[in-house]
Image (spheres, rainbow, N blue to C red):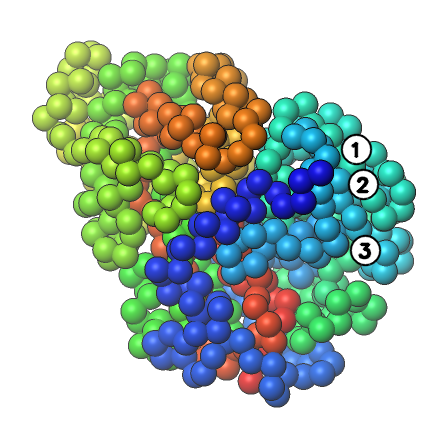
Amino acid sequence: MRRTPAPGRALAAAAALATTVALTACGGGSTSGSDGPLVQADGAPQSPAGTLRMAAWQEAPSMDPARTTTQNGMLIFPEYDTLTVVDEKFTPKPWLATSWTQPDPKTWEFKLRTDVKFHDGSTFDAETVKANLDRAKKIVGGPYTNIYAPISKVEAVDPATVRVSFAVPQPNFPYSMSTVAGAMVSPKAIKDGTDLTRTAAGSGGWIWQKDAHREGAEHVYKANPDYWNKAAVRAATVNVSIMQEDNARLNAAQSGQTDVMSTLQPDQMDAAQSAGLRVLNDFTSTGTFLIMDREGKKVPAFAKPEVRQAIGLLLDRDAYNKALLSGKGDSENGGFAAPDSPWNDPSLNDLNKPDVAKAKQLLAEAGYAGGFTFEVGNAPVIKQVNETVAQLLKEGGITMKIVDVANGQYTADVRKGRFPAGYFVPTSIDIYQWWSRTVSNKGIYNPFGLDDLADMEKTFDEALAMSDDAARKPLLSRLQRQTVERGVAFPLSQNPRAAALAASVRATQQPVFAPEDIAPRPYYLWTK
């Protein structure tokens, strides 16, 4: 049996992302303005003490992990444990699962901890994992359909062993179980059919305080006195404030009102460092403009391949990087994989070089010489993105109207088909998730029920059936190229993912800051 997950090697290779400052900072190095190394055990409280104050950019639509996105992980992880976590090299490591093997390409088997209790007193075991995965698979329209749908069977081999079988190989499943999709809900809550919209049922290091929750403003968590990993819980209270505006979060961090700020924008990074904050920064996501209405159900123009190709020629990556990311992004990359990821293909860098004249010619050929208008959803955290994209499209005569959506509803509105296109930040580390979640017709961003990528789906399935990542790479490079050439999605830049920590924040060991997290998880963190 093969012991090391295939994606582990790929994700480990992606650790070459240490050319950016975040991984250095997470690994214990210091950044400009910080006060000593991040990883420091000396002086840490031996039992939970004090309050760790965090700032997130949006309210969670639900406290049910299977129904909320990775962008809301900051509100999920204190309450819930995941099967795995990832290290600074983005390699899956044990958490609730102690080890895993792959008996065959379509099967993963996990060994589990036997000392875990949920906050409601129920026990974690193989039946719990089975109940969670079976339940998640049945949720219609959930954000992790791409992860759960391929599961064909879950078996509790014994109380400490669970076997997960798939219809097609899933080489990255242990990695997926480190995300919100791998968070385990209490078996009692599942059996009782508990509505977890504003109730929580986890086994995590902190217990969500329902009475202290202020909708759209604040979440409070108290340390779990019976937690199985006591060394990971150093703060007595975790307080997460909801601050939609970027400047509000930065001001709170600079003024000492918060200790951990999520979603630091590129144009805020220098100011944060100058203020003495520790900035964690890396390339783990691709700013992406996705066209979902490719049959023109809402916007007839999008049914024309020439129109979509024109949009790609108008989305000047270099201009986007300079205008929006203060030059801190990677706009040379014409694909969807991080610069030093094993999935990066330099031959894609020449895709969609900006050409306004050619774009206008294509629009005229499609019957839209005078342009057309469409709407996109807007939230404060992507307001500047939308404005920048709108300016670029205006060069070709296309009007992109920006429509504000309710707090925390951007993804939900997109998935309901309210908008024909929009901005997304898929992972650039896990190529499997990039395809299956964001691009694939089987993914969560196909609200119009398209089947136009059927041939590409076959290519992806062919890649999954191969024995190793080296054999898969040419096929996955082809998918990246076809995604752009067919006008499905366009990479705008490798975005610098950044969070800011107060100089007083320390970690007793390497903190968990997975590629899809918007800030480090509270485990191991303490304030000096």
Are the two marked residues, 1 and 2, in contact with CB atoms closer than 8 angstroms? yes
The picture quadrant where one finds residue 47 is bottom right
Residue 451 placement, left or right of 333: right
Residue farthest to the bottom?
43
Q: How far apart are marks 1 and 2 (CA)?
A: 7 Å
Q: Looking at numbered disc 2 in the image, what kind of residue is underneath it?
A: Val
Q: For the residue labelled by badge 3, is the local secondary structure a helix, a strand or a loop?
A: loop
- Residue holding disc 3: 113
- Residue holding disc 2: 162
Image vertical order of residue 115 relative to residue 104, above or below: below
Residue farthest to the front?
1
Q: For the residue labelled by badge 1, is the local secondary structure a helix, a strand or a loop?
A: strand
Q: Name which residue lies at 44% across and 50% down.
A: 14
Taking depth in this image into account, of 313 and 408 the one nearest to the observer is 313
- Residue holding disc 1: 154
Q: Name which residue lies at 14% across and 30% down.
A: 355
Q: Looking at numbered disc 1 in the image, what kind of residue is underneath it?
A: Val
Of the 4 image quadrants, the one containing the C terminus is: bottom right
